[in-house]
Amino acid sequence: MKLYDGGRAPNPRRVRVFLAEKGVSVPLVPVDMAAMEHRGETMTRLNPLQRLPILELDDGTVLTETVAICRYFEELSPEPALFGRGALGRAVVEMWQRRIEFGLFGAVAAAFRHLHPAMREWEVPQVSEWGEANKPKAREFLHFLDSELAGRQFIAGDVLSIADITGFVAVQFMKPARIEMPEGLDHVRRWYDDIAARPSASA
Amino acid sequence: MKLYDGGRAPNPRRVRVFLAEKGVSVPLVPVDMAAMEHRGETMTRLNPLQRLPILELDDGTVLTETVAICRYFEELSPEPALFGRGALGRAVVEMWQRRIEFGLFGAVAAAFRHLHPAMREWEVPQVSEWGEANKPKAREFLHFLDSELAGRQFIAGDVLSIADITGFVAVQFMKPARIEMPEGLDHVRRWYDDIAARPSASA
């Protein structure tokens, strides 16, 4: 199999960090997103929605969507479990994964895509008012997350999960999105530093 | 356990259709969203993010997020499998579930929330330009979906999955969102009529 990778873009990065936590190595095919290679003929044939990452299996089967690719590797290499354990544990990870995706990752991505000049050809139309509206949404969610992290080490419980990876990449993505971390969020800071210190953080 | 339900709103409806397909019956607690009851004290204690549906277990454990609640019931009552079968099958359902959520459900919801006068207190700020921008996005996705449904009966393969439920509720949601179904999408029409004819469609 091979993984078509998009370098610094946050979704390809989520998959790379996930694979590093799993200890799984997959051949990467770099795709130059700045040169719009992901919208070229080859990539469009693999994913008509023109998004990365894309996993291509040896029989030609194509899987897209970050979380679908991660879930496939969770099935192939169950340990360490990053989607939770047991019926309730897996549901709790799903809940937090979605809270982080909608409340933080999505808000940061909207601010970046609708406000950054480099995104003008990517996000059509750019709606700057919508980009600005998402900045306070992201900050408000971080306050909620801080209150939750007061009571436990990781976002979905006492062990690392895919929700932490999504949250970690989202917080790093705040810099190019020009969203400042609110002050005083000590639990978010402690959690972020913990994740940043893991070897997977440089993946 | 009990399920706090939001009547006609699309996310509570997704869970009810899912449970009907599973043949699982859960006591429903109606929450009057028009009267903003989901933002009242009781509901906010259960879900600080003030969203429905909410599943409360007998021991007081709270699960939120539509897909997390569905996944919990998939674990408790595995048949019929609505999240796919086998490593690749489950990944393919996840891929389509997310394509439908981001490309269709999310676009329709954005048009509704940012343009409908009844949403003025719900979506703050309403950004009408963003609402309008989502209408062609939803229609464009439906053309893509039509080309995919030319080759198979259901969205993620030959059997019904949660992606069909999400897609079905999204298409029905187009009416209040004032998005017209593009003409000539015969495969989408055939698929929609199939789902609408199932007993679960009235859940």
Image: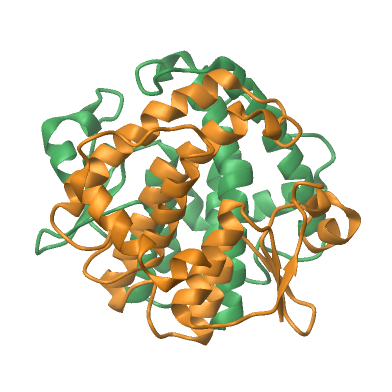
Chain colours: A green, B orange
In screen coordinates, is A45 left or right of A74? left
Q: Position of residue A140 (x, y in %)?
A: 76, 38
In screen coordinates, is B8 left or right of A31? right
**Count of numbered circles on the image:** 0
Q: Nearer the viewer, residue A61 or A34?
A: A61
Quarter-of-image position of residue B43: bottom right
Residue at 34%, 33% (x, y): give it: B139
Position of B73 relative to A121 (above/below): below
Which residue is at the far left?
A: A59
Which residue is at the far right?
A: B41
- Please state, as top left, top right, bottom left or bottom right, where the N terminus of chain A lies in the image: bottom left
Residue at 27%, 57% (x, y): give it: B191
Q: Position of residue B146 (x, y in %)?
A: 22, 45
In screen coordinates, is B120 left or right of B94? right
Q: Nearer the viewer, residue B79 or B27?
A: B27
Q: Position of residue A190 (x, y in %)?
A: 74, 52
Position of A202 relative to B195 (above/below): above
Residue at 63%, 44% (x, y): give it: A103
Q: Position of residue B55 (x, y in %)?
A: 69, 71
Position of B197 relative to A167 (above/below): below
| Residue B101 appearing in the image | yes
Q: Nearer the viewer, residue A53 or B53?
A: B53
In screen coordinates, is B176 left or right of A13? right
| Residue A196 appearing in the image | no
